[in-house]
């Protein structure tokens, strides 16, 4: 019997493997300098602190570490997340009960798709937008509408128009140091977008994995703080402490959280308890802000170094907006150079990035690309950008 | 603005919170003896061994413990799972590549629903069946058809008839020490069912969380061993080592595994790495079979003790089939006594169980109930069964 006879669901037949995760396999050879992933710098993980926290967890919690837990997540951790991130949101009754721990914020995206999207429902997402969100939502077969990004974030005119025409289930955005573009929605636009969303009764999904990885001192108020009644806020420890722990969270109005909880129970019962308790012990004992300062300082230097190299090797070939935080540069290649072709040339020259295509739903802008600066050393960054510059020159020479 | 205006997906509007997880909240007061959950005995967790394994993991793996991992799962763990459970399956090319690590086997159920079920698709499941599977699949809106259980498992005549009439996407079954009934499909029936399934080209989902928790010496061959080409096998470390780690797995033909992997990437990128590596270190250093022997011996005694108490306090009120493994007794109350009413009376008498209703899709058999013997001590078991007996007598007195 041929295996080809399996009859799969329509939703999965329309889906492809994650392009980035496939790229990561190609780029795992040691000779390749990879700016493709979105991984944190492993040298900045608080390894010794988490090891101590893990020892404390085993000492203090015994078999609780190993037993089934509640679907909502470990209560002391939910309380700490609330205190740190949501205490000052002006929304009556908001409490740690509004926090649900998820298996990374990727799971939050999946659960949101599950509880909101009927096939064909319109949803709005930044264009280009976060690939993981596109993948998670797509499996629920929505009609995805991209809202273009300007240098200071979402295009409000297009947004307003689209909202009133399509009545979407929600707008998903990564407004601070966006993945993939590194762009940040300005404070003024945050206010205005909140008003527009409120007028249209539209749910807003504020995905904020990078907000704390900022290179300037002043914090940016969340859209949730202007529009708490219909914002679903997503957070994670993946960029600050450990992605491997897969501990993220959702903060949402109670009625939404109740539905997310039903979906969570059906999806994995609850998230890993050991890691939740280890993180809670870490937060009891150490200062997360010091850890974040370390990351900020390091990534700021890496970002500056990458920008210097970009100026040195690629100023004639690409444009970019200098990111004020996060992990990525987004390049627009001049002369409509195709970044997929550049990718092939670059791999041949032992350097990798992610072509822009997978970040677009609908027609991609084929001359865009994402390069990560958090994962490589400063020396490697210069060498890698130099190699990309070489590949562009080679490719230009062929085209001429 | 009222929160009631959120517009959810049809699938979630049809779903309820997990009845069992809600019961577990009610029964968490210390004065209540609870036979409701399906938790392992925490005294049998290999706490010291896992603590050592955790120390080794931090010593040996450093930042790899904390970084993003591959969606397939930690390779050495996949290899060990393959060696232990699938090496002898006679299917060409079956290898560790056919194993996908999931966030508990609950996630495997969700992913299977995602890749196979279009709304309205018929699927077959034991009647009564595992609640977590019913919940996971239901969110993909299948047409669920229950296949009744006989004392030696699935009713083959009904199965054969239903298969040819409905052409279902799959048959889901928990053939060994089933949750909730504790029943086991006989070897002879396994053979026959495999033939029937092969004839009808039907995918079989063999969920086997309890297979190793057997009270008799002889092992029972899996249905997968007779029908490897279309069986998806689910396993977990939740009943043998730790449910809190949320480490389960799927073993499936390559084409199915590829689709599961796409769904996995969209659902949570990958499962917790720390726990995968800790489990792998545990398996490197300790003998899982000794751990399982400990569990078997303890649960066998508990099961015998519960059966003695059932004979002492409930022989006039209920029938049951003595389970040969697993964690549960399934009772059929005599005189059509309603187990939901008994549940209320029992809670008032400080003892809890799960009424049979939630394990049925369609019309339930209202005089059934599940009682767990793994989680309570032997002394508690006798006291608790005595209290259930008292509650039945009280309820019978009222009805008369």
Image (cartoon, coloured by chain):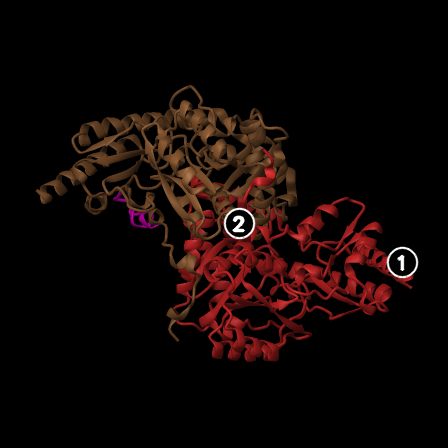
Chain colours: A brown, B red
Q: Chain of mark 2?
A: B
How busy is the neighbourhood of tag 1: few (under 14 within 10 Å), some, or many (20 plus)?
some
**Which residue is more in the foreground, B110 or B145?**
B145
Q: Which mark is residue B9?
A: 2
Reading the image, the residue beneath label 1 is: B394
Per the model, the C-alpha gap separating discs 1 and 2 is: 44 Å
Residue B90 found in image quarter: bottom left
Q: Position of residue B148 (x, y in %)?
A: 65, 72
Q: Chain of mark 1?
A: B
Q: Which residues are magenta?
A: A22-32
Judge whether residue A302 is colored magenta. no
Judge left or right: residue B304 versus residue A306: right
Q: Position of residue A261 (x, y in %)?
A: 59, 45
How busy is the neighbourhood of tag 2: few (under 14 within 10 Å), some, or many (20 plus)?
many
Q: Position of residue A87 (x, y in %)?
A: 58, 26
Residue B235 found in image quarter: bottom right
Q: Is residue A127 above or below residue B201?
A: above
Please identify, in this view, whether the residue under mark 1 or under mark 2 is nearer the observer: 2
């Amino acid at each position: 019997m041929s295996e080809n006879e399996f009859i799969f669901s329509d939703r999965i037949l329309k889906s492809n493997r994650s392009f980035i995760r496939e790229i990561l396999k190609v780029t795992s050879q040691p000779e390749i300098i990879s700016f493709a992933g979105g991984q944190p710098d492993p040298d900045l993980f608080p390894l010794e602190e988490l090891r101590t926290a893990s020892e404390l967890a085993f000492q203090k919690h015994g078999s609780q570490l190993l037993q089934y837990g509640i679907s909502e997540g470990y209560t002391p951790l939910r309380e700490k997340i609330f205190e740190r991130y949501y205490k000052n949101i002006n929304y009556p009754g908001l409490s740690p009960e509004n926090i649900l721990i998820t298996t990374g914020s990727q799971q939050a995206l999946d659960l949101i798709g599950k509880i909101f999207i009927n096939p064909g429902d319109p949803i709005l997402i930044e264009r280009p937008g976060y690939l993981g969100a596109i993948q998670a939502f797509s499996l629920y077969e929505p009609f995805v509408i991209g809202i273009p990004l300007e240098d200071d974030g979402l295009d409000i005119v297009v947004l307003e128009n689209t909202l009133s025409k399509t009545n979407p289930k929600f707008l998903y955005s990564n407004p601070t140091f966006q993945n993939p573009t590194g762009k940040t929605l300005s404070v003024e636009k945050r206010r205005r977008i909140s008003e527009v969303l409120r007028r249209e009764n539209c749910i807003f999904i504020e995905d904020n994995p990078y907000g704390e990885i900022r290179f300037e001192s002043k914090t940016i108020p969340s859209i949730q703080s202007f529009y708490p009644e219909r914002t679903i806020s997503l957070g994670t420890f993946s960029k600050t402490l450990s992605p491997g722990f897969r501990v993220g969270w959702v903060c949402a109005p109670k009625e939404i959280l109740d539905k997310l909880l039903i979906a969570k129970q059906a999806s994995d019962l609850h998230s890993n308890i050991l890691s939740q308790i280890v993180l809670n012990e870490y937060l009891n004992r150490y200062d997360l802000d010091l850890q974040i300062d370390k990351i900020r300082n390091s990534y700021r230097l890496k970002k500056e170094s990458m920008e210097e190299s970009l100026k040195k090797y690629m100023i004639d070939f690409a444009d970019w907006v200098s990111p004020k935080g996060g992990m990525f540069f987004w390049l627009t290649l001049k002369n409509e150079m195709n970044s997929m072709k550049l990718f092939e040339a670059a791999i041949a020259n032992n350097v990798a990035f992610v072509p822009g295509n997978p970040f677009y739903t609908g027609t991609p802008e084929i001359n865009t690309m994402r390069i990560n600066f958090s994962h490589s050393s400063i020396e490697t960054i210069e060498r890698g950008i130099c190699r990309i510059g070489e590949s562009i020159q080679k490719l230009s020479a062929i085209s001429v």
